[in-house]
Image: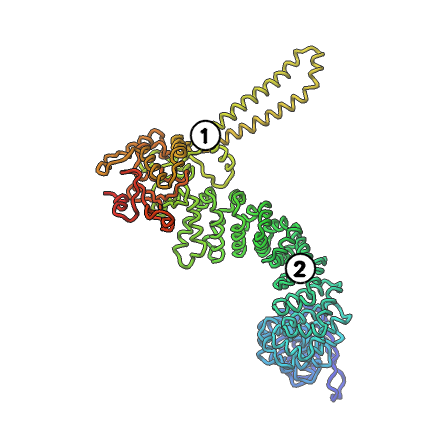
Amino acid sequence: MGKKVKKEVEPPPKDDYAPLFIESKTAATVVLMLSSPEEKVLAAACEALYTFASKGDENKVTLLGLGAVEHLHKLISHENLFVRRNAIMVFGIMASNNDVKKVLRELDVTSTLISQLAAEDVVIHEFATLCLAQMAVEYTTKVQIFEQGGLEPLIKLLGSPDPDVKKNSVECIYLLMQDFESCSAVHAPNVIPPLLELLKSEYPVIQSLALKTLEVISRDGENRKILQENKGLDYLMKILESNESSDVQVEALSVLGNCLEDVHTLQLIQETGGLKKLLEFTGASSYPDIQEKAAKAITKAAYDSENRKILNEEEVEKYLVNLLEIDNDGVKVAASQAVSAMSENSASKRAFGPQGIPQLVQLLNSDNEEVKEAAVTALANLTAASPSNASAFLEAEGIEPLVNTLSAQRDGTIASAATVLTNLAEQVSLCVNIRSQGILRALAEPLRSTNSQVQSKAAFAVAVFGCDAEARAELRNAGGLRPLVALLSSKDEEVRRNACRAITVCASDEQTAVQLCRLGALDILEEMNLSTGRKNNFSEAALGKLLDNNLSQKYSQIGYLSSSNIITDGFYDCGQLKPGVKILSLEELSMQDLTDRRAIILINAKRQDLAVQENAQDSSNELTVLSPSVSRKGSRRKRSSVVSLVDEKQELSGHRSSLSKRSPREKALRKRKETKEEEKIKEVAEIISQMEDEIKLEDSQWLPPPDLILMDYINDAFETILPLTTTREKIVALAQFVADKMGGPIERDKLHDFNWQLHISEIEFELKCNVVPIGKIKKGTFCHRALLFKAIADRIGIPCSLVRGEYNRAWNEVKLVGDAPQGIAALLLPPQEYIVDLMFEPGSLIKQGSAQADQYKQMY
């Protein structure tokens, strides 16, 4: 390296020869001297290398490359004190280099260094502990030091008169306590007293290391007891009361925070007035680090219910609210976390409401994501089962920023925000207010999260707020149904349960239920309910709700509609589906080419103008189900209006074009009106463009073809059947009415001659479509008559069910009270079930379970 190394080495006092001078231009020469058999040369060479290595990291690497470490390793246990001391000095200074530390680990120098801690030489103590401290940053070295018994001699050196030895020893002990089981093993009372004595040191670095070590050790309950027995709390309180640097006070608060986890310790501090002093010290401090640590200490203590009572008695809430106002993000986070912990105490929860909630609401607008998460988590705890705090949240105008928080970056923030929303929804007035803020639209994105906690909370929030039709429409339009259905397949049990709960609520209207089925919710729920491991309390309810609000699917799948399943316009029967086959939409079925398969029977007694209006409103919804016929009445009216507007525009333009033919005076009179006419022309043009767009939209939409005949049937039923006195009379009359419209009574032995198949095929051919409105059927068999009976009965309030049998059989079941006995006693009898005969003796009621009933259900 071309560097000159020159050092004078003093020999032992007993030697009577003159000092030895070593001069060399290269470090390599000095390294070679480490092999000398002369002790004077060895001591001098080590001292020279110490000076060389002290000048920088580059020199340490040079010595490593020259093999100095291996030579020095042999000398650190040399018999001569001077040689041994100087060699350890070189190791101490070189161990700061990572490459050197690696070689030292390979040479296993720790055992030799530990053995030198028993020497009486202070310099050896200083550099041996320095070397161990620098090596103890590595986990493997910590294990070696602990296993080789290095902890005890290090503890003894804490009482050394030399500050450097104290500093190196306590630093090494601190590092040993990190990441290692020795922390829990240090229950012996000999380690804590010397650490507490170090707190009296005049050197802040020694105080700081002692406090850091105590903080790690005091995480163990047994060590906290030893600390208290040695009056450690007094030492800590004295540091807080003194004018020491804020760094030392912060570390003292960290130790104190561990101690406050024990109820008896907190009680002791309260009884001696230390707790009040601690809170006052925190409130008066101007150091954010101290305020943050104090809040963290309160958080640790507040994890215990008894501790929360003690802290509440000292009115800790007002101190925490003040900390929320500090202009420091770390303090705000720690204070919010302390509020979260203290809110488990009902008295504290009430105390935080008036002042704490407004402060936390403000933090929701913070640019710091950690602050936002801590604040919304605190709000989640404060608003849980607390109407007063929910009202305080509303008064603080927190709903809008809370909804915005659903788009935060942290998963914990989003999950807590959803929790707050569901907490608030327990108040009906707040629930309405929140829905008006577009909550379901905001929840669509959290449903797509990959975090199971976010998924679960978001799905639960959908279940809470999805009870409103407008809210469900928001979720559909925001594309939230697809990720909601995907959550049904989650591996997380809670996610699946809340997703089922949300599906149960969202399937409350037909449009949403149909879309959920199209997205695969029905298939997933059916599979889930067959699995004992994945089935839950809400999966069966979700499946039932989906089917109850998608009756076309339900009847095709399970072949049964109960009296509570009301058939509405747009219902269609496409027959019994095989397992695994999905039902197509009415639009898809109508677009298919004419086939020889079973006709799809449509129920639709809705007027065209209403259908046009409703479909126009839903045109933007996700997966809108269109229907087989195009309505033109609304379009024709709009076209007529457009023609009138075009005529008006042309008339205005004609006025302007005729202006050139007028006299100068007339031109002057007309010129003042020219600007207004131009504005009128532009306005008319905009209206024409808008109406043309509406016409295109209406012309592009399929609508169910109006069944005028069915409309007449229903009107006739309202006029002639509904006024009848008893339910039995209405059932009989309706049965005869349906049979009359579907080909009349059929003799049992001539049933096969009733050629209804050809009749319906002719209707399909006439319509060029597989979809047949039920009113067009004049020769109908069991399945057609039972469907028509159910459709009209639902309109006029006759409770009945619809059951599909085999081979085109179907029937209606009704419940009636028996004929005898009469009077009040009859009301006490349970109703009996009957099948309504629509084929052979229309209007006769066949008792369920009888041989006649079985005969009616089955083919001959």
Residue 801 visible in image: yes
Residue 121 appears at what percent x and percent y? 70, 83
Q: What amino acid is found at the position of numbered circle 2 in the picture?
A: Phe
* Horizontal arrangement in the rendering, residue 107 relative to residue 515 (left or right): right
Give the residue type at disc 1. Answer: Ser
Viewer-side residue, 185 vs 848: 848
- Asked where in the image residue 754 lies, by quadrant, the reply is top left
Residue 747 in the image, given as x and y percentages of width and height: 24, 36
- Residue tagged 1: 631
Q: Earlier in the sequence, mark 1 or mark 2?
A: 2
Secondary structure at badge 1 equals loop
Residue nearest the viewer, comparing 834 with 268: 834
Decide: few, some or many residues near mark 2? Use Cα within 10 Å; few <14, some 14-19, many ≥20: many
Identify the residue at the far front of this view. 823
Q: Is residue 278 left or right of residue 527?
A: right
Residue 100 appears in view: no
Give me the disc on residue 557: none
Q: Which residue does the numbered mark 2 point to in the structure image? A: 352
- Quadrant location, the C terminus: top left
How many badges with numbers are in the image? 2
Q: What element carries label 2?
A: helix
Is residue 627 placed above or below 172 in the rendered structure?
above
**Residue in the foreground of this view, choosing between 409 and 806:** 806
Which-is-in-front pick, marks 1 and 2?
A: 2
